[in-house]
Amino acid sequence: MRHRSKTVKLQRDKAHREALLRNLASSLIEHRQIRTTLGKAKALRPFVEKLVTLGKKNTLHSRRRALSLLGSNQLAQRSVKVLFDDIATASADRQGGYTRIIKLGQRRSDSAPMALIEFVDIAVPAGDAEEES
């Protein structure tokens, strides 16, 4: 039975999966949108939405919690600053659903389904989409 087993494993062990989600979340926060596979985008969405909810609280505890989820390197620290200053303030009146996933079709090399994940309330500068795999 699959009761209460919602974790998308992405054919990786736990440490690799957590590192992947941290890196994808930091890239999404930094670039406002990323292009990745559909499975990774679907796994990333709840992780990022919890981070934005932490950002909307804007307390010291929520900043430290976001840092613990994203890691303690310089990229994570920049991402937390951008998350709390820009993204959370832009999504202040929204009750959830901070991201959208747009299906892009299949990748030519291996026919993997691709998707674009982006923030709903944030405008993306032209030509700033990052390629992830």
Image (spheres, rainbow, N blue to C red):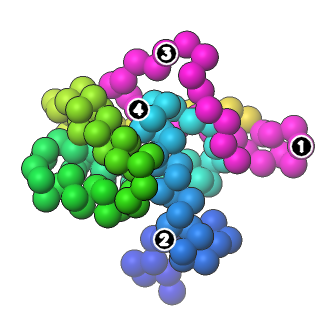
Q: Secondary structure at mark 1?
A: loop
Q: Is 103 drawn above or below residue 53 in the view shown?
A: above
Numbered range of the magenta stretch: 106-133
Residue situated furthest top in the rendering: 126
Q: What residue does disc 2 label?
A: 7
Label 1 sits on residue: 109
x, y (%) of residue 97?
A: 33, 40
Q: Residues within 10 Å of mark 2 (few under 14, many from 20)?
A: few
How far apart are labels 2 and 1 at the CA level?
27 Å
Between the C-alphas of marks 3 and 4, the distance is 12 Å
Q: Do the residues under discs 2 and 3 have CB atoms within 8 angstroms?
A: no
Residue drawn 37% across the image and 42% down it: 79
Mark 1 and mark 4: Cα distance apart in space:
28 Å
76 is within the stretch colored magenta = no
Element type at mark 3:
loop
Q: Residue at x 13, y 59 (%)?
A: 61
**Nearer-N-terminus badge (1/4):** 1
| Nearest to the observer: residue 103 or residue 36 | 36
Q: Which residue is mark 4?
A: 119
- Identity of the amino acid at label 3? Pro
- Contact between marks 3 and 4 (CB within 8 A): the answer is no
Q: Earlier in the sequence, mark 3 or mark 1?
A: 1
Which three-letter amino acid code belongs to the residue tagged 1? Ser
The Cα–Cα distance between marks 2 and 4, rounded to whole angstroms, is 22 Å
Query: Which sits earlier in the primary sequence, circle 2 or circle 1?
Result: 2
Q: Which of pointers 2 and 4 lies earlier in the amino acid sequence? A: 2
Q: Position of residue 109 (x, y in %)?
A: 89, 43
Where is residue 51? Give x, y as percent.
Answer: 30, 50
Query: What residue is pinned by disc 3?
Result: 125
Q: Closer to the camera: disc 2 or disc 4? A: 4
Question: Residue pushed farthest bottom?
Answer: 1
